[in-house]
Amino acid sequence: MSEREVERGSGVAVWRQIGEALADDIRNKLYGPGEQLPPEPELATRFAVNRHTIRRAMGELELSGLVRIEQGRGTFVQEHAIDYAIGRRTRFSQNLAAQGMRGHLEVVDSQTLRAPEIAKHLGLARNADILHIQMVGKAEARTIDVAEHYFDPKRFPGLEEAVRESRSISRALTQFGIADYTRKWSRITAAMPSAPVARLLNQPKTRPVLQVEALNVDIDDVPLQYSMTRFAGDWVQLTVSDND
């Protein structure tokens, strides 16, 4: 534990001194990647301050990328970024398995809607119904992305249930005779998350996300799936490859 003590009247805010002391603890490996920091009451006792001051220090550490705050769980040391490959065959579970991690998808919400621009991507009429499935991608127990997936519901009746059961879009599509599909194109940008997306990613709204817009096609080059995926920028490093 850092030997640094809080000096009141030093000209440096107390919460900032606490943040620096905890940052020293993290850099000195007192708390490893993914490890939970002591709870607020314990830290308040250690530094002889109130919990509001501890929260201010933790907030600054989160903005600096050293920790992440999970609502209802606590504060954890930030892990190293996951390498996530974007290529002709981008598969969530396979990307994580290649790094020795288990991953799966969970359905958050689904609905049928009409969206002319998305219908255009899918090669459908502007007023066609579209199946929208919102999902979170999990690496072990942690959420690393929030994705909006869009399909033709007439082509894939019951797809939402199949995705829920299999926790995988690829496995669900095999039930409809889609043994393989490829990425037609991807667009990668940085963006600020909406409040609901930030909440699902367990991050502040002020932290940017990596946004990947993409279109997948079947073996006949027919549009299959349009998606917009938002990755936690401090947990995921995107790599682009032309390989399968």
Image: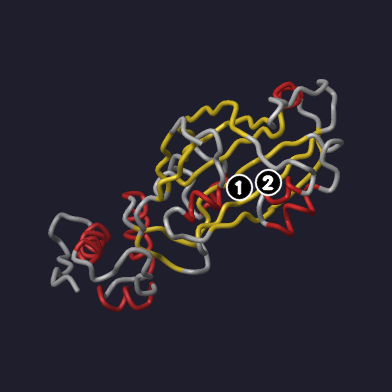
Q: Is residue 5 left or right of residue 46?
A: left
| Image label count | 2
Q: Nearer the viewer, residue 61 or 163?
A: 163
Q: Is residue 153 left or right of residue 106?
A: right
Q: Give SS at disc 2.
A: strand
Q: Nearer the viewer, residue 200 or 42?
A: 200
> Which numbered tag is attached to residue 196?
1
Q: Is residue 202 left or right of residue 113?
A: left
Q: Which residue is mark 2?
A: 134
* Residue at the image position 15 percent from the left and 66 percent from the top: 7
Tell me the crowding category of disc 2: few under 14, some 14 to 19, or many 20 or more residues within 10 angstroms, Cα based.
many
Nearer the N terminus, badge 1 or badge 2?
A: 2
Query: Can you say whether 221 is above or below 67 in the image?
Result: above
Q: Nearer the viewer, residue 102 or 179?
A: 179
* Residue at the image position 83 percent from the left and 36 percent from the top: 155
Q: What is the CA distance from the residue labelled 1 to the residue labelled 2? A: 12 Å
Q: Position of residue 122 (x, y in %)?
A: 73, 26
Query: Can you say whether 186 is above or below 14 in the image?
Result: above
Residue type for callout 2: Gln
Q: Give SS at disc 1.
A: helix
Q: Quadrant of residue 118?
A: top right
Residue type for callout 1: Pro
Name the image quarter holding the N terminus. bottom left
Query: Can you say whether 180 is above or below 234 in the image?
Result: above
* Residue at the image position 52 percent from the left and 68 percent from the top: 72
